[in-house]
Image (cartoon, rainbow, N blue to C red):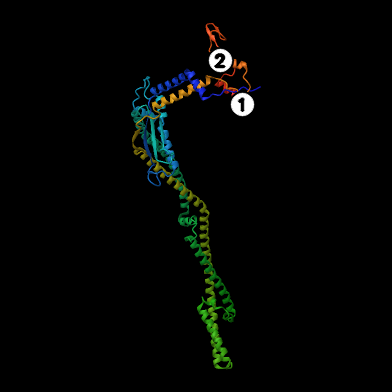
Amino acid sequence: MNRQSQPILTPGQFLTILRGHPRRWLVPAAAVALLAGVYALVRPATWEASQALIVRNEAANSQESLGKFSQSDEMKTVQETILELVKSRKVLADALREVPPPANRKPAGEAWPTDRDVAELRKAVKLSPPKGAEFGTTEILYVEVRATSRPRAIALVAAICDQLEPRFQQLRDARAQSMIRELEKAAALARHDLAESTTRLSGIEQEVGSDLGELRGLEGGNSGDSALRRTVAEIRNELRGAEAAQRLSEELLVFLKAAQLDTDRLVATPNRLLESQPALKRLKDGLVDAQLRSAELLGRMTDRHPLVQAARESEQQIARHLHGELATATSGIQLESRLYADRVAMIEAQLETATGQLDRLAAERADYANLTAETQNRSQLLERAEQKLAEARVSQATAKAASLIGRVDGPEAGINPVGPARSMIVLAGLAGGLLVGLGTLLMTVELAPPAPTHSSPARPTDHAAHGARRCPPTSHGNGHQKNGHTETAAEPPGALSLKQALARLAATGANGN
């Protein structure tokens, strides 16, 4: 059994259908075109006006070039703030109060402007950078406003800019006042903390007194000699000298006591011990010289020779003087030894005092260093707070005196309304109507089945049915008349509309898969 062939629409059949059913496509096309024409006639014209603005940074707080933004993020933040202000209710409402309401607005007993008017203007206002740019990359901005007439669009964009500048100044002033209040609190707290630490530091300095310089030298980590450390070093050197002199006198005293018992031992005494006793040293040298002279004479003469006896007499006389001088020197050395002992004790007391003073300063060095660092830190905090407070006050003063927003020329509007022209709307409606009409025609018309592709002869019933469909109905023959109307033969089962043909194609494809 052969599958039934699907209907195929040829260009000739399409033209035949267009001529055979003109109402099916002309009526929708005319209706859509008529609606488009009515819309083009009643559609209000939309005009767009723009005002170029330039934004700069605050000159007082600029670290680099005056009025320039140091970073693009900073510029972007300012521009986004301006964007929010442009769409704010206060700016839009004040701008609408400056511009009279449109002539076609019917009074509703409400004050101008209403919330609806502000909302409609907010939709019509746009703030954007130049074409191809983004926020934060350029200092130029465009305020664009759309209205029903060209003069109203220009007036609205001018009024919005007039309200934007003072509103932005008010915002800067409010921000500066908030910063001033905050920085005043911070400066007062830093000033109080600095006074408290300064009082504690002053108490330590008063306790130290005259040694404040030495304490500051220790706190500063000064590796050089300070006055107190030099004093300690000098006392220690003096103590070493006194102790050496004391030991020397004690040794000399021992030798002198021994020499009193044996004069010959004095000859063996080192000369360094006798440097403090010049008379004793001279007698010792004279005794040595006399002994040498006697020895020399005994080498040439006998003991009874007058010269030998004279030399021995001289030697004995020097020894007697030496013995007497030894007693005197011993008394003097004993006194000198006691003096040296007292001096050593006094120097040791001085050294102990100076060392104790240095130890006390070293013990307070850590607290003093911490207090000094704390005071310096709080002083720097106070300095920074006062500097920021001064900058905030400058910002507040400049916010009231100058605006950061400048206008470039005046408002500009095009010579033609924005959007498509009326002729374009009508042409688009006509084209859309034709498409709707053709679509309606193709969805509702019935298509004839194509000729069979196999070579078997057509069945008589098919030819009969085909002939019956082509023959016009008559009141006799095969036609039947019922209630005054002529009833034609039933259409063959292959005649389908485009919608039915598409549905059958989809079903056939699903069965084939």
Instruction: Tell me, yes or no, if residue 4 can be seen here.
Output: yes
Mark 1 packing: few (<14 Cα in 10 Å), some, or many (20+)? few
Residue contact between numbered discs 1 and 2, judged by CB atoms under 8 Å: no
Q: What residue is at 51 percent from the left and 77 percent from the top?
A: 277
Q: Which residue is mark 1?
A: 509
Determine which of the numbered discs, if any, sits on residue 247 in the image.
none
Whether residue 304 is situated above or below residue 102 in the rendered picture: below
| Position of residue 329 in the picture relative to residue 53 (left or right) | right
Whole-percent x and y of residue 428?
A: 43, 26
Q: Is residue 201 above or below residue 127?
A: below
Rendered location of residue 227, percent (x, y): 47, 61
- Disc 2 is placed on an element classified as helix
Residue 182 appearing in the image: no
Q: Amino acid at mark 1?
A: Gly
Q: Earlier in the sequence, mark 1 or mark 2?
A: 2
**Relative side of 12 to 69, left or right:** right
Name the residue at 55% across, 93% down.
306
Residue 469 numbered mark, or none? 2
Amino acid at circle 2: Arg
Q: Is residue 319 above or below residue 236?
A: below
